[in-house]
């Protein structure tokens, strides 16, 4: 049934635009790049209802392209292998620098109460004797990905503000390779603590994993929270046809009202909707990243 609907939508749109130029002739598909914070199968399952809806609404196939990490998404943007992106704030800051601003941010997610933004957190095993950040001295600590906002940039900047040198403060540090991997690493004892995120106590990496049956409820707890940081950003390459960018923007904004089931699948039912965003919303994170680079260079 879905395939027949998609075929009908494509045929109708083709007929509508047959007499004139259309962005679909220039860009016959939309490849949506995102990094693998969960398994590729899990992410594809969450996003397939949305991509099916967008394909029908836009008249071109929309497909998710999952890369191993944020750097993979940035490289795909640079090489023209994707048209659309899904980044955390730090990933957006990285991509903005590497692509020399060739990004058109469009929308971001609201939390269940309609608020925007989230917090970086540090998690430990629920039975750990670690109760505060001070207790982490001499223990091991996992970041998730060098391009992650909550998994690297925010805790790194917080450590600097606290006057903490991670190399000497922790017994060891490392990268887990993703949000889920960080949680697993804490639970199995590979690391004593790890960077993660939450938008609320009932919407976090760990609650999503509990809901998916990957970990038992109450396996971890939070010992530190950051200030509010900008939430994820969905956007496109800025060098694409302007009318295409606006069509995708409109389709995304309409998504929660037109297909709530698909939107809830994408967000695990924990988002009230979407909000439009602009580059300026991420300017502070970009500055934070710039300062972090200077600190690493010893400037």
Image (cartoon, rainbow, N blue to C red):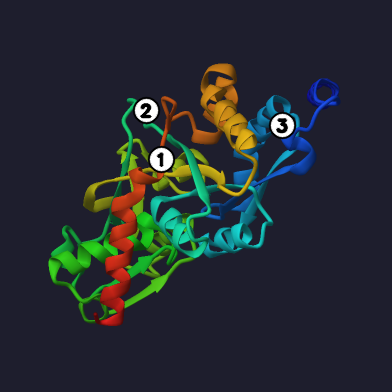
Dot 2 and dot 3 residues touching (CB under 8 Å) = no
Name, please, the residue furthest toward the front: 20
Mark 1 lies on residue? 278
Contact between labelled residues 2 and 1, with CB atoms less than 8 Å apart: no
Q: Secondary structure beneath disc 3?
A: helix
**Which residue is located at x 62 percent, y 30 percent?**
247
Asked if one can make out residue 102 in the rendered structure from this viewpoint, the answer is: yes
* Position of residue 253 in the picture relative to residue 50 (left or right): left
- How many dots with numbers? 3
Q: Which residue is mark 2?
A: 112
Q: Residue at x 36, y 67 (%)?
A: 142
Please identify, in this view, whether the residue under mark 1 or under mark 2 is nearer the observer.
1
Q: Nearer the viewer, mark 3 or mark 1?
A: 1
Residue 55's disc number: 3
**SS type, badge 1:** loop
Q: Is residue 242 left or right of residue 274?
A: right
Camera-near label (2 vs 3) is: 3
Could you say which is closer to the camera, residue 200 or residue 99?
Answer: 99
Q: How far across and down, in percent of the image, does residue 138 sit? A: 21, 77
Mark with earlier residue (3, 1): 3
Which residue shows up at 51% across the image and 50% down it? Answer: 103
């Amino acid at each position: 049934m879905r395939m027949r609907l998609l075929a009908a939508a494509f045929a109708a749109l083709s007929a509508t635009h047959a007499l004139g130029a259309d962005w679909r002739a220039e860009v016959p598909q939309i490849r949506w790049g995102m990094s693998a914070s969960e398994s590729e199968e899990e992410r594809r399952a969450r996003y397939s209802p949305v991509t099916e809806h967008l394909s029908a609404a836009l008249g071109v196939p929309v497909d998710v392209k999952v890369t191993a990490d944020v750097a993979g998404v940035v490289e795909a943007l640079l090489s023209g292998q994707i048209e659309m992106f899904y980044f955390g704030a730090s990933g957006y800051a990285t991509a903005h620098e590497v692509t020399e601003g060739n990004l058109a941010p469009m929308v971001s997610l609201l939390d269940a109460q309609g608020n925007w933004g989230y917090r970086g957190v540090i998690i430990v095993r629920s039975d750990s004797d670690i109760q505060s950040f001070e207790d982490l001295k001499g223990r091991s600590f996992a970041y998730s990905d060098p391009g992650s906002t909550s998994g690297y940039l925010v805790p790194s900047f917080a450590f600097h503000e606290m006057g903490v040198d991670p190399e000497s403060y922790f017994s060891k540090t490392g990268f887990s390779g993703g949000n889920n991997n960080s949680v697993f690493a804490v639970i199995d004892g590979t690391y004593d603590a790890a960077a993660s995120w939450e938008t609320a106590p009932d919407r976090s990496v760990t609650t999503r994993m509990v809901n998916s049956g990957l970990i038992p409820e109450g396996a971890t707890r939070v010992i530190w929270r950051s200030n509010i940081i900008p939430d994820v950003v969905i956007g496109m390459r800025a060098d694409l046809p302007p009318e295409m960018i606006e069509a995708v923007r409109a389709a995304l904004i309409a998504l929660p009202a037109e297909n709530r089931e698909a939107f809830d699948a994408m967000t695990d039912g924990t988002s009230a909707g979407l909000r439009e965003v602009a580059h300026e919303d991420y300017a502070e994170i970009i500055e934070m990243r710039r300062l972090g680079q200077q600190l690493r260079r010893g400037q």
